[in-house]
Image: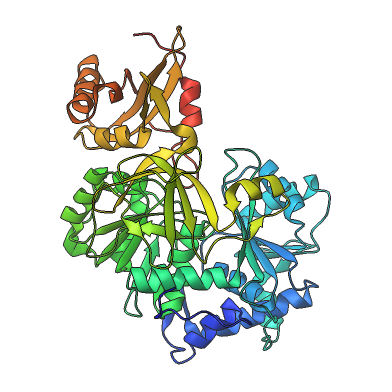
Amino acid sequence: MPDLVPHPPEQFNFARHLLRLNADWPDRLAFIDDFGTLTYGALDEQIRRCAGALIAAGLRREERVVLLAEDRCEWPVAFLGALYAGIVPVALNTLLPIDDYAYVLEHCGARGAIVSAALLDKLQSATERAEHPLDAIFVVGGRAPTGTLDFANALAESKPYDQTGRTRADDPAFWLYSSGSTGKPKGVIHTHGNLYWTAELYGRDHLGLSSADRIFSAAKLFFAYGLGNGLTFPLSVGASAVLMAERPTADAVFRRLIDHRPTVFCGSPTGYAGMLAAPNLPSREAVNLRLCLSAGEALPASIGEHVERHFGCEIVDGIGSTEMLHIFLSNKPGDVHYGTTGKPVSGYEVQLRDDDGHLVPDGAVGDLYIHGPSAAIAYWRDRARTRSTFIGYWTKSGDKYWRDADGNYVYAGRSDDMLKVSGQYVSPAEVEGVLAAHPDILETGLVGAPDAEGLTRTTAFVVLKQGIAASPDIAKELQAFVKERLSPHKRPHHITFVDDLPKTATGKIQRFRLRELVSAPKD
């Protein structure tokens, strides 16, 4: 570990760590949301009052409380208040179906919940389907019906809790539930120390964030990416963060960029593509950006270059995971190579291995393995998947990469998305990156399916920019565009024009749904 980043002490509570860091500037803004602001002094008091309210409701150390709330100032208060008391918050995606909430409530054994008023009906429906009832439900931002507690009133009536839960750096601090694309969602257990390491190694050391920054993340706080961007990173350097409760549409993002003038914006490739295509994209002079971040999927070089030309600031692309909590492989401000994911973040090691576990040479595609101090402890109640992901010293990411001659890592797709065409591997991400550079394309997703003879044929689903009409001529032009830039076998066999692509809540393309749309087309 770098000498400039000291290890946290053995007895360590991340919430208390943040309060101590910011004790000298109580009047400085910590959060700005759609309803008001919260200073560091007020944040300190509300965190300790929240801890007291949770304890008064009967919750105890290491018991779980689900956090199902919109991004507003109460979210960090609830999350850090639970940590301060030694209670474990389980941050939930606000866009899940009721069945998923019922599964998570039962799986994690939650004793309590903190929920936005707009989501209370969903939570109560899920609770009815779960085997064990919740002992306490706190309602944020609206009326608290009989049998629930008003979050604001509970904090006002609670005495500030002045003794943190006696936690250690390696104690469970919070859980996140990872995508259920390969089965039921997995409960990922993270420690107090993990939050510290991501903030220090990536937020402070790698990105150079400081108290002069104002950070705005389109990714929500319940995602690992958004949790770092919008909470742990700014609070670890005394900066401020802009929170947004509504969906991160281009117009919603533009309003915050103009009205609140953040210096750092954190988005995803899909979001950036939508922003660049929007007719009311604000000018460079209308915003105050010095840096943009991207994660969630590989950033096409054309989008990165376009963002930099327009806003006059670099866009730093990186890859992280729920299991590693935040980004471990990334470009760096001042050393950005568009079309790559850069180099390992200081404090992390990465390896590329073949199917037999052997290291692959530069230029060859391999499975990505990571070692670093922010790795999760395990998946809750899932020993088999824990063993297949957390392998001794290493965490297997499920991503394919290759390394170029300059030591930069280039994304080749998810391990289960790789296609074999004419006996040779094709990376959907590589083909999509080329297609994204075409001036008529807004976004695209590539999948493969067997034809009548059992041979893999690829189909590129394409969303055209506004005003461009789909036609057989454009389809042929796109195929030729790829063939001129990549090996012939990587040319899409078919082009299918669609109005939009199916995506996860994080903006990732759901290729399994695209595959369902492919009915073995014939040449």
What is the x, y in percent for residue 260?
33, 68
What residue do we see at 50% from left, 48% from top? 397
The image quarter containing residue 85 is bottom right
Residue name at image x 68 percent, y 85 percent: 161
Q: Up-down: is 294 above or below 457?
A: below
Quadrant (top left, top right, bottom left, bottom right) of the N terminus: bottom left
In the rendered view, would you say 71 is above or below 357?
below
Foreground residue among 213 and 243: 213
Q: Residue at x 77, y 71 (%)?
A: 59
Q: Residue furthest bottom?
A: 24
**Residue 400 spot, x, y in % from top left:** 42, 41
* Observer able to see residue 31: no
Q: Quadrant of residue 292?
A: bottom left
Question: How many numbered discs sit on the rendered protein?
Answer: 0
Examine the image and state in which quarter residue 215 appears: bottom left
Residue 389: x %, y % from top left = 58, 49
Colour setup of the view: rainbow
Q: Is residue 363 above or below residue 446?
A: below
Quadrant containing the C terminus is: top left
Question: In the shown orientation, is residue 400 left or right of residue 148?
Answer: left
Q: Residue at position x 34%, y 39% from top?
A: 364
List x then y, in percent, for residue 163.
69, 87
Residue 38 can be seen, yes or no: yes
Observer-nearest of 323 and 17: 323
- Residue 289's place in the image compared with 271, above or below, is below
